[in-house]
Image (cartoon, rainbow, N blue to C red):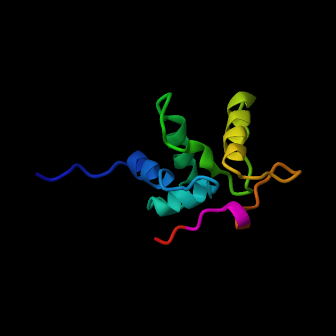
Amino acid sequence: MSRAPESQYERIYRVVGQIPSGQVATYGDVARLAGLSGRARQVGYALHALAAGSRLPWQRVVNARGEVSARRDPEPSARQRGLLEGEGVRFGSSGRIDLERFGWRPQW
């Protein structure tokens, strides 16, 4: 019996699930690793669609500047930052993460 092809969201979730604690990836990195180059926004949509209580480490995905993306409601941004800091990710005074230090570089 053959399996149904993996959806774009499933591919995104598979990549995000591989990001280790204490490291981050950009939306663009996740898109590229999921075979969706140039579709960073699709990653954002997929993460926004996660069910409440999901165990996927969504907080480890940041924008290309190494920042937590701004949202209309600031609570999720503060939560994301708190989760990352709890994993040892450090933010500079500008609110940016040093992607050279904390960026995930998979060996795929």
- x, y (%) of residue 108? 46, 71
Q: Give 104 or 27, whichever is nearer the viewer.
A: 104
Is 103 included in the stretch rendered in magenta? yes
- x, y (%) of residue 83? 66, 40
Give the residue drawn at x 71%, y 52%.
89
Give the residue drawn at x 64%, y 54%.
22
Magenta stretch in the rendered image: 101-105
Report the magenta stretch's main SS: loop
**Residue furthest out toward the right:** 93
- x, y (%) of residue 19? 54, 55
Is residue 10 placed above or below 99 in the rendered structure? above
Residue 72 appears left or right of 60: right
Residue 45 appears left or right of 78: left
**Residue furthest out toward the bottom:** 107
Give the residue drawn at x 76%, y 55%.
97
- x, y (%) of residue 40? 57, 53
Q: Give 19 or 64, whichever is nearer the viewer.
A: 19
Q: Give 98 or 72, whichever is nearer the viewer.
A: 98
Give the residue drawn at x 57%, y 48%.
41
Q: Give 85 or 73, whichever is nearer the viewer.
A: 85
**Residue furthest out toward the left:** 1
Is 39 included in the stretch rendered in magenta? no
Disc tally is 0
